[in-house]
Image: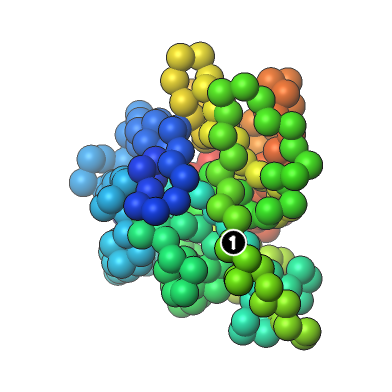
Amino acid sequence: MAKKALLVGINDYRQINDLSGCINDVTNMRDILLKYFGFTVPDIRVLVDSRATKVNILSRLKWLLKGAKKGDTLIFHYSGHGTRLRDRDGDELKDHMDEAICPWDTGWDGGLILDDDLYKIFQNLPTDVNLEVILDACHSGTGTREMTVMKDMKIRFLPPPVDIECRMEEGLRVKGFGSKSQLKTLNHVLWSGCKDNQTSADALIGNTYNGAFTYYFCRHIRDTQGKLSRAELMKRVRSSLRHEGYSQIPQLEVAEPAKEKGVVFQG
């Protein structure tokens, strides 16, 4: 059974505000995969900063899925800016918004990777392949106005420019990657650093910058050597973030049996 991972982290963006903890997130995640989950160096592809273009990310995602078969474990971790914009495809049933991650060469006219893009990439994956998607990014602009920003902390949210925000046509709809309807057809696990109306923190923890979610995610895996259920890991991460004063509430989208009984990064 194969193990493959694609880890993407972007601190230094081409034209938008930079972040500080995303590269550390990638190295942190890579370390736990190698130490606790049986991954080897060739199993893991890493894209950071200027190499994490939209073309390169999509190309590496094809590598991640190529030849996937029953029992394989695939991991896609993204650490960087996230955003939301009005959907123009007519498939968002709840909030009329497309969620998106921001490549190094982000642009508002086709330069984002939308939730719809990820869904299309993953939808043909065999259902007996274990896919885990970990997104440490913001998925909403609302929280940037509601959240009290702590010292030495940045927000991983990219607000759309005014002309994009003004696209407020009636009747817009979208599904959102990780929705319950998709869980019925995809054997994937989605970890998100916050709710879809919140922001994720890029914070100074100790003496280094990290994504707060990824930091505590990896910390609790190390504390238990990876031997805990997904539900228990999420419980511990939420508790640590709350204790340290972060308002973000990480989310876990997965079928219930795998949530309670499934060991992290296993079927």
Count of marks, rendered view: 1
The image quadrant where one finds the N terminus is: bottom left
Q: Nearer the viewer, residue 143 or 67?
A: 143
- Across and down, in percent, residue 24 comes to 39, 31
For the residue pair 135 and 55, the one nearer the viewer reads as 55
Q: As shown in the figure, which amino acid type bears the numbered disc 1? A: Pro
Q: Is residue 103 left or right of residue 204?
A: left
Q: Residue at x 35, y 52 (%)?
A: 14
Q: Residue furthest top?
A: 206
Looking at the image, residue 68 lies above or below residue 238: below
Rendered view: 160 above or below 236:
below
The relative height of residue 226 versus residue 131 in the rendered view (above or below) is above
- Can you say whether 222 is above or below 95 in the image? above
Left or right: residue 82 versus residue 113 is right
Q: Quadrant of residue 91?
A: bottom right
- The answer to whether one can see residue 224 in this image is no
Q: Is residue 156 visible?
A: yes
* Label 1 residue SS: loop
Task: Specify the farthest residue to the left.
Answer: 42
Position of 158 with respect to 68 (left or right) is right
Q: Within 10 angstroms of label 1, few (less than 14), some, or many (20 or more) residues?
A: some
**Residue at image mark 1:** 160
Residue at 46% from the left image edge and 57% from the top image edge: 102
Quarter assignment of residue 186: bottom right
Q: How is the image coloured?
A: rainbow
Q: Quadrant of residue 103?
A: bottom left
Question: Which residue: 62% across, 82% down?
Answer: 88
Q: Position of residue 226 (x, y in %)?
A: 50, 31
Left or right: residue 140 compared with residue 202: right
Percent of width and height locating residue 135: 53, 49
Q: Residue at x 28, y 50 (%)?
A: 50
Residue 222 horizontal/vertical position (percent) = 48, 23
